[in-house]
Image (tube, rainbow, N blue to C red):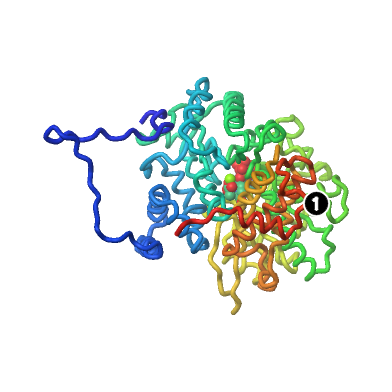
Amino acid sequence: MAIQDLVNGVPTPPETPFEGKVVKPVHYSTYPSPLPAQQLARLKAHLNSLENPLLKHMHLSRIRRSDPDLFFAALKDDLNQMAPLVYTPTVGEACQKYSHIYTGPEGLYLSIDDKDRLPEILQAYAATLSRIPQIVVVTDGSRILGLGDLGIGGMGISVGKLNLYVAGGGIDPNGTLPVVLDMGTNNQTLLDDPLYIGLKRPRASLAEAESFMDTFMDTVSTLFPTTVIQHEDFYSEAAFLFLEKYQKKYRMFNDDIQGTGAVILAGFLAAARKASALSGLPLKDHKVVFLGGGSAAVGVAKEMMNFFLMEGLSEQEAKERFWLIDTKGLITSTRTDVVTDKIAGHKKYFIRYDTEGKEYKTLSDVIEYVKPTALVGLSTTFGAFEQPVVRRMAELNKAPIIFPLSNPTSKCELAFSDALEWTNGKVLFASGSPYSPIVYQGKLREAAQGNNFLVFPGIGFGALMAGAKHVTDGMITASAIALSEAMTPDEESDELLYPRLDRIREVSARVAAGVVLAAQKEGVDTTERLRGMSWDKLVQEMLDSQWHARC
Ligand SMILES: NC(=O)C1=CN([C@@H]2O[C@H](COP(=O)(O)OP(=O)(O)OC[C@H]3O[C@@H](n4cnc5c(N)ncnc54)[C@H](O)[C@@H]3O)[C@@H](O)[C@H]2O)C=CC1
Ligand SMILES: CC(=O)C(=O)O
Ligand SMILES: [Mg+2]
């Protein structure tokens, strides 16, 4: 299928001539339409009859396109069960197999081959719309979760994120636009696959990609001036380049760098307070080791610096609470790639200058050297937090903070059951993909899900409601604070690190309200009627503006 067919939608099949007449399929019933509650029960029964999560994902995907009200009612009804099907981990497999399970277009597929015609294509698309999009999620498919370059299959993640914008944030589904920019792929399996839908060419260079992105950002922001654009799952160099270039120019943010940063800052605030209450360690003395030095790790570490700044440390002192490890070991000033200036630009901020020429190659070496209170995994490496490391964290800390955040579950650094077992239940745990609760030593333990989906719907919604000219760093940090303050006393006493998913609409409204207030404080808002509102009124305003399924 030509990419152009995907942009315009699959062509309508020709009508069948029959005895000289055009015969159209007839659907006719004298029975009343099924009740919405019945439809919901029928959908659940169908899902229960399917064992394979990918088949459930595919069925849900068809329902989303044929009956969005039913689909979003189902998500709202039981987000704990549904999120793993429409989002991580199943969405990862769906992106990997995208061209095999494809049954029709789900959004906008734009090819780099059409770069010069991009404004024309987007204008033609805009002319078909009855309203302009509120939120665009765009990826180039180059780093989908921890699964690498999945080319045009990245559309699955744009769709998955927008599902949560609707279900969790209350955005109207008609205001969502998933986009994949097809810039080729370096994934040989896809290039060799006869069913692969995308361009069969090597991935565009960063310079080519930048030029395509410039046109995309400019055209979308001109055609849809109020739309919020979320960048998703670009490989790290591209992610940082685009964020730096567009942050102050367009109403955009990068979910992996900024959204993840905010959600983990909120979880760390909760975890560090619990750990310090047990150990007596001053909050400012926490020490955080990261396995991973990509967009997510650097984004999270930079956002987490706010924790130490709030405790009164200077920027330099705050930065020194972090140790980042990549495939070459601890990032130090004496490492060869640092000395020769071959290290990626985004890693430079966290270079350690205090290691006196000694290199620390393995995670165990770094743990022994730093003796951290917290260990964060954003390395895309399944099982990288091995038993000796986890046991050592438990020896060093009364309540070790361990956040294996890589997605999907097949890339997670540490399973929840192992974390409990190897720390004798002492761990303060959050993972990027969900784990079921476990009864451990007679007590029900719930794994926190440290995933940016707890904030991005509120960031996007808040930016939209505020009419923010840009999404500022202050608005991102405000989303983290609002999330951490959204915990109920019950959730606190159940030792949770994040609010429960069944309150996601209220939590997203609070996050959005925090984002609006920050936009106002920084003078980037344009929605005058929200100015001067009390916190409670603002939260209510966000709740009242949420979309609800008619089901
Ligand atoms: N929980 C959440 O909300 C989020 C989770 N993520 C996850 O974070 C992971 C990383 O994402 P990015 O930073 O964008 O990817 P990336 O590919 O840019 O970064 C991965 C980093 O890990 C390092 N690394 C890989 N294997 C390693 C090993 N064995 N030991 C030490 N370091 C190793 C690499 O050198 C690189 O610095 C992905 O799995 C992604 O799904 C990303 C965003 C949000
Ligand atoms: C959650 C997310 O954005 C990621 O894993 O890339
Ligand atoms: Mg992502």
- Judged from this view, the residue extending furthest toward the bottom is 442
**Can residue 302 be seen at all in this image of the molecule?**
no
Q: Does dot 1 land on a helix, a strand or a loop?
A: loop
Q: Position of residue 493 (x, y in %)?
A: 69, 73
Nearer to me, 239 or 194: 239
Q: Position of residue 27 (x, y in %)?
A: 25, 50
Q: Position of residue 190 (x, y in %)?
A: 42, 36
Seen at 71% across and 55% down, the residue is 538
Q: Quadrant of residue 298?
A: top right
- Judged from this view, the residue extending furthest toward the left is 19
Horizontal side, residue 328 vs residue 224: left or right: right
| 296, above or below 179, in the image | below
Amino acid type for the residue under numbered disc 1: Arg
Horizontal side, residue 413 vs residue 13: left or right: right
Seen at 44% across and 29% down, the residue is 199
| 357, above or below 501, in the image | above
| 452, above or below 109, in the image | below
Nearer to me, 475 or 399: 475
Q: Quadrant of residue 356?
A: top right
Quadrant where the N terminus is found in the figure: top left
The residue that disc 1 covers is 321
How many residues crowd around disc 1 within 10 Å: few (fewer than 14), some, or many (20 or more)? many
| 370, above or below 355, in the image | below
Q: Position of residue 314 (x, y in %)?
A: 88, 48
